[in-house]
């Protein structure tokens, strides 16, 4: 039922208009409604198309994000520095008590620690295999050679002596290049230095100057109870 018929029902006592009048009225009404319906349809289709485009963009973004997350490699673990740059935290089941490092040889460092067991170990790690080290505390000293895998100082054997455990210690270490003029054992060596002389290690280091070859030293003991 169109608008012309509704008007005719609303005024029942009035005589009906001529058929030509009704036809012209309906033609004008149809011409007026046509652009309005087209505009409404365009607005409706425009909103629908825009919503579809937006939805498609969101879906594509989510798919790309999930794909990137699924295909992204896991982050690599932090690189562990070589032992001669930083003494490892654990050595043969023992925990590190204290440690120091030097970027050059013909140098010295002092570490401080308090041992709690006879398993205490003093380990020197050297970049250059065959490097010469010497350790001293008070009137006691011990030497040896070291490499990247480490070298043990026999000074830690004093842990078996009464009174050595349970107190603080300060041990000084020197490391020299493999070809440093250091006396070894009973063999003769012209111009070689006996590092057991209290002044010899510092004098030799001063003469050589800083040489290539990083090294580190650490004291290790049984893990603390947790």
Image (spheres, rainbow, N blue to C red):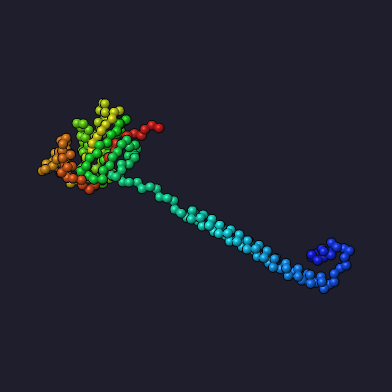
- Quadrant of residue 95 within the rendered picture: top left
Task: Count the labels in the image.
Answer: 0
In the displayed structure, 60 sits above or below 159; it is below
Which residue occupies the extreme top position in the image?
162
Residue 116, percent across and down?
Answer: 32, 30
Residues 100 and 180: in front is 100
- Quadrant of residue 107 within the rendered picture: top left
- Quadrant containing the C terminus is top left
Task: Say which residue appears at 82% left-offset and 73% top-offset.
Answer: 20
Residue 35, percent across and down?
Answer: 69, 68
Residues 43 and 67: in front is 43
Which residue occupies the extreme left position in the image?
190
Task: Say which residue appears at 32% left-offset and 41% top-offset.
Answer: 88
- Quadrant containing the N terminus is bottom right
Residue 44, percent across and down?
Answer: 66, 62
Task: Say which residue appears at 20% left-offset and 45% top-offset.
Answer: 210
Residue 154 visible? The answer is no
In the displayed structure, 20 sits above or below 113; it is below
Residue 203 visible? The answer is yes
Which residue occupies the extreme front position in the image?
14
In the displayed structure, 120 sits above or below 211; it is above
Residue 76, percent across and down?
Answer: 40, 50
Q: In the picture provided, is 221 more to the left or to the right than 28?
A: left
Task: Say which residue appears at 51% left-offset and 55% top-offset.
Answer: 65
């Amino acid at each position: 039922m169109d608008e012309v018929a509704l008007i005719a029902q609303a005024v029942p006592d009035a005589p009906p208009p001529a058929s030509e009048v009704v036809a012209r009225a309906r033609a004008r009404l149809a011409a007026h409604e046509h652009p309005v319906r087209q505009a409404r349809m365009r607005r409706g289709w425009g909103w629908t198309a825009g919503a579809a485009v937006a939805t498609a963009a969101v879906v594509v973004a989510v798919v790309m994000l999930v794909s990137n997350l699924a295909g992204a490699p896991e982050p690599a673990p932090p690189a562990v520095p070589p032992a001669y740059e930083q003494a490892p935290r654990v050595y043969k089941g023992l925990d590190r008590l204290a440690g120091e490092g030097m970027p050059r040889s013909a140098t010295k460092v002092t570490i401080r620690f308090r041992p709690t067991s006879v398993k205490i170990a003093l380990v020197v790690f050297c970049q250059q295999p065959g490097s010469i080290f010497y350790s001293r505390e008070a009137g006691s000293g011990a030497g040896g050679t070291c490499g990247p895998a480490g070298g043990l100082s026999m000074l830690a054997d004093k842990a078996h002596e009464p009174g050595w455990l349970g107190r603080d210690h300060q041990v000084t270490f020197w490391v020299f290049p493999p070809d440093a003029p250091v006396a070894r054992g009973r063999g003769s060596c012209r111009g070689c230095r006996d590092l057991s002389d209290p002044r010899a290690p510092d004098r030799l280091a001063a003469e050589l100057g800083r040489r290539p070859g990083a090294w580190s030293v650490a004291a290790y003991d049984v893990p603390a109870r947790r």
